[in-house]
Image: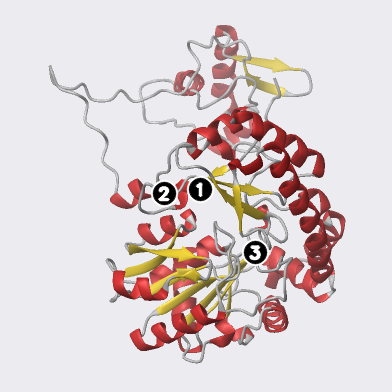
Amino acid sequence: MTRMRASFVPPVAVDPASASPIYLQLSDWFRQAILSGQLHPGQRVPSTRRLANELKISRIPVLGAYEQLQAEGYLETFQGAGTCVARAIPSDLAGPMRAKPPLPSEGSEPAARRISRRAALMRTPPQTWLSNLGAFRVGMPALDHFPAGQWSKLVSRHARSLSVDGMIYGDPMGYLPLREAIADYLGAMRGVRCEAAQVLITTGSQQGLQICAHVLFDHGDRVWMEEPGYPGAHQALRTAGAQLVPVPVDEDGIDVAQGARLGPDARAVYITPSHQFPLGTTMSAARRMQLLDWAARQQAWIIEDDYDSEYRFGGRPLASLQGADRHGRVVYLGTFSKVMFPALRLGYLVAPRDLVEDFCAGRDAIDTFTSTLYQRAMTDFIREGHFARHIRSMRMLYQERRQAVLAGLREHLGDRLKVIGADAGMQLAGYLSPEVDDVALSRTAAGQGVSVRPLSLCYLEPPGRSGLILGYGGASLEEIGEGTRKLGQCF
């Protein structure tokens, strides 16, 4: 067992005024800490000299306590490693002490511990299909093709030259050079009309949604949601107290006319127009104009999540909805998690000009600011051209993987999965026959090491349509071939 360094002195309690000798107080404290699991077998304890100095007592009682504990088998000494908790403490003695729950009255069931309604809304059922990587984990980029060496150099560059400015609390809006780089990128590539002052750095689109909810909504405000739509948005907005109104999605995107009938008093709408999650369709120009007109007339907000917009394989790239907004009703969300790697935890939000101070205050209230070190490295990654090169490279790779998935599905599933919306992003969706339980099928596939997400869980109002969502960004060609074969066998 690996022994831990005694970098910290445990919170040993002694009372000089007690009638009990100090060496007995010390031995009792260590014995109880070991039996309760506070100190673990093999963990190093402070030297007698160091503990005596910390407690401002003589070293003699500390020596006496340690000798007593060694004699009883609770401590042992190692050559060159000092004194450690004995590794042979019986497992039935050493372990965390648990408080006993109160006994229920005779004939009654124990009452559940009370939690907030918000916490209950955050719960999700077990999702076994999320335990696998490779084929076909949704939202996973090609991490094996990420230029990790170049990224490491940039992080090391800023870590080595870390100044006081890089270690203090940062601007809640984010590192200004990164905001400037993002504003330039969004203007050139996505047609977003903004200045760096409007860009707010987040830890991802999920936090962007939470900030939007805190700034824009009151409890009970109604919000249109695409049906089917992104479960993460359902969760973020529900826990903020929003009342979600499911609005059907067709091949042109969210049905604005239907939304106006279902939720005429809605405060906002959440959409993924460039690559609808989960169906993969693209919102038509006519629907975009309808939605912008509705938002302007109703004084409502549009939260545009520009999901997977970097990867489009058919036709010309589409500009953002925000770029066509003339009334300042659109809040634009983006993330680097899918383009770079999920653990980076960097995203961005473009706020309307007159709400910048409100969004800054909302960001500050949630968790102050985002890690400055990664923001600085990301700035160089964009400015030095690595970001654009990586996107170009991944676009070709994902197109190849998409074709492999389509071919594999045709070969092993035939007409059992009707693929839709496969011309963009890092995933595709398909409809199953109504009699097929997509949740059960996803669990069966997970048992075979294949991760497919059930489409029905993306609906707010059950029963949702049966189908599967397959991510191909993080799956090699070999994994795709094997994954489609196993998926076919699951039927």
Q: Identify the disc placed on residue 455.
A: 1
Mark 1, residues whose alpha carbon is within 10 Å: few (<14), some, or many (≥20)? many
In the figure, residue 76 lies in which quadrant? top right
Can residue 215 be seen? no
Q: Position of residue 47 (x, y in %)?
A: 65, 28
Mark 3–mark 1 Cα distance, whole angstroms, equals: 18 Å
Mark 1–mark 2 Cα distance, whole angstroms, equals: 8 Å
Please give the name of the residue rendered at 54% of the width and 22% of the height, measured from the top-left corner. Answer: 61
Q: Nearer the viewer, residue 103 or 341?
A: 341
Ranked by sequence position, the earlier of labels 1 and 2 is 1
Question: Would you say 233 lies left or right of 407 here?
Answer: left
Q: Position of residue 123 (x, y in %)?
A: 40, 44
What residue would you read off at disc 2? Answer: 464
Q: Nearer the viewer, residue 226 or 182?
A: 226
Q: In the rendered structure, which amino acid carries the disc numbered 2?
A: Gly
Number of the front mark, 3 or 1:
1
In the figure, residue 302 lies in which quadrant? bottom left
Ranked by sequence position, the earlier of labels 3 and 1 is 3
Residue at the limit of the structure toward the left, as seen here: 106
Please give the name of the residue rendered at 76% of the width and 66% of the height, measured from the top-left corner. Answer: 377
In the figure, residue 276 lies in which quadrant? bottom right
Q: Identify the disc placed on residue 477.
A: none
What residue would you read off at disc 3? Answer: 308
Name the secondary structure under disc 2: loop
Please give the name of the residue rendered at 79% of the width and 23% of the height, measured from the top-left corner. Answer: 80
Please give the name of the residue rendered at 70% of the width and 41% of the height, measured from the top-left corner. Answer: 135
Q: In the rendered structure, which amino acid carries the disc numbered 3?
A: Asp
